[in-house]
Structure formats: structure tokens, C-alpha cells
Image (spheres, rainbow, N blue to C red):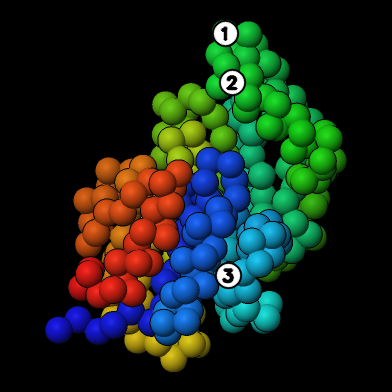
Amino acid sequence: MAKAIKLLISDMDGTVLSSKQKIEPETIAAIEAAKEQGIDFAIATGRNYLNAKELTDQAGITCPIIASNGARVLTADGEELSATTLTTEQAQQIYGIISQYEVFFEMFCDKGLVTAQGATIDAAYDSLKEMSQESDRAKNVLEFFHDRYYVNEDVKMIDGFRSFIRNQTNQVFKFISFSFDQELMKKIWEEIEQKVEGVYVTSSGHDNIEVMALGADKGTAVKTLAKHLGVSIEEVAVIGDNLNDVPMFKVAGMAIAMGNGHDDAKAIAHQVTKTNNENGVGYAIRQLADRAWT
């Protein structure tokens, strides 16, 4: 008989977060109820640590966080268990490729989220502005990036980006690039894989690609966290919705895909739950607690 689940590790976007970008009260209640039944909870996200922690704090949840797609693993107290970083050369190469195209990009580093001030972002912004005249989705995304870069300044605009990278030795965790042009995203993905050695490329949505060092993936991070907590990998359940969740699906005792998830994630999952707007994480927790899924 399968071992009882002792640890549930959840993705954030498209999973534990609703489309309102928050953890809903019903989901919070399910997480707390699971803890009372001996099932601990943790996060595994592509977001950076500070942003992920802000969202869990808003929900009143204190838990370990796997951040930047597995590049960082931190305890509930914020102690860093592991950090897998890109080398300066890798970061320079990735930036060199991305900066050739009219796409938004962000670099996750010890200083937070940064991007390059100048032609690349300006061109991407102008292109999206033109598209927004004909597309409501493009208009919404334009507003998102405008607020992110120019109003709230969640992402720091850096002048002299190559020099900045040189000063971030062993502190660059991830690059993420965004574009509505899926063929362009595919082209950038393939170019990075062909030209940059020792990196792992994945995606958390049809309009982005994410680049980390090899070994910085959610599967490796899940094993690191489980070992630290004294939980066997067979006693770990993971839940997610996209391609960047597949590595943890492959290692955990139970893999649960969201109803709104990518087909490739659903294909290798042991179970499929409801969507993120239907409290899919809460539903999965109840199934695990009741031993309905084994």
C-alpha cells in the first residue's frame, strides 16, 4: 500500500493562486486543516523568494519556499538550504541572445528583479502598445508591465546591464523572457540551448521561457527540501499546472495536475484536480487527507 502523504508542495501561478493572484480563504482553510492531520505544506514557484513570501504572508501561511524554479530552497524561517546560480559567463550569454529581440525580460538576482534600461525593453513596450489597440489581452499586459516597471518599480531598470552582470558573481538565479510571439519564444529557447552550455530552459506559460543553471529545477529542489524535513520522497505530493512543474512530478510519490494545466503535465500526473479558480488545491488536499488518492 502507498505511504501516507506527509508533505504537499504546491506551485503558485495557475495552481494555489486564483486568477485574482491570491490564495483564496477556502484554500487557506484546507491547508490549515491538512496541517492538523499531519500533512505539511510548502511552495515551489518560478517567482523570486521575496515575491512568493509576500503572497504567503498575505495569506497568513508560514512555510518553506522553493523559489526561482528551484534555484533557491529556503526553510519556513528563511534559512537558505541551497542556491544554484548561473555563472557570469552564462548570464552574459543569455542576455546577449535575449537582447537581440523585441521581448521583455527579467533577471532574478540577489538584488531582486532587474531588467536592462534601453532599446530592448523600449522596443518590446512599443510593440505591445501597438498590439494593444487591437487586443484586450495585449492592453491588459501593457498595463501590467507599465505598472511593474514604471509605477510600482517591482523590477529595477538597470543602465549598463553587462557591467551589472559582472558584479553579480554567483548571485544570478534565473532569466525569464516574455512575448506574445510564440514562434519567437521557441526561437530564443532553441538558440539558448544551442549556444549556452550548462543551462536548463523551461516555461511556466505559453508566452514565456525561463532559464536557470542545470540542477536548478523543481525536482531537484523538492528532493533537497524533503531530505531536510526528514520526509521520504514517496511521502511527498506535488501539485502544479505547467512545464516547469514536470521535474517535480517525475520525482514525487504523487503528482497532481491542475484541471487548467498543460497537457504535458496532465499526461504524467497520477491525479488531476479541479482548476485554480475552483479551489483545485483545496480539493486535492481533501482527497489526500481522506486517503481517497493513493
The residue that appears at 22% across and 62% down in the rendered structure is 270
- In this rendering, the answer to whether 100 lies above or below 31 is above
- In this rendering, the answer to whether 201 lies above or below 20 is below
Q: For label 1, count other residues whose C-alpha is less than 10 Å away and answer few (under 14), some (14-19) or many (20+).
A: few
Q: For label 3, count other residues whose C-alpha is less than 10 Å away and answer few (under 14), some (14-19) or many (20+).
A: many
Question: Which residue is the site of mark 3?
Answer: 65
Amino acid, disc 1: Glu
Question: Which residue is the site of mark 2?
Answer: 138
Labels 3 and 2: the sequence-earlier one? 3
Residue 89 shows in the view = no
Amino acid, disc 2: Ala
Spot occupied by residue 106 in the image (x, y as percentages of width and height):
66, 44
Spot occupied by residue 163 in the image (x, y as percentages of width and height):
80, 50
Labels 1 and 3: the sequence-earlier one? 3
Q: For label 2, count other residues whose C-alpha is less than 10 Å away and answer few (under 14), some (14-19) or many (20+).
A: some
In front here: 260 or 132? 260
**Secondary structure of the residue carrying numbered label 2:** helix
In front here: 75 or 126? 75
- Relative side of 120 to 228, left or right: right
In front here: 219 or 238? 238
Q: Report the quarter where the N terminus lies.
A: bottom left
CB atoms of marks 1 and 2 within 8 Å: yes
**Secondary structure of the residue carrying numbered label 1:** loop
- Give me the C-alpha separation between circle 3 and circle 2: 31 Å
CB atoms of marks 3 and 2 within 8 Å: no
- Give me the C-alpha separation between circle 1 and circle 3: 39 Å
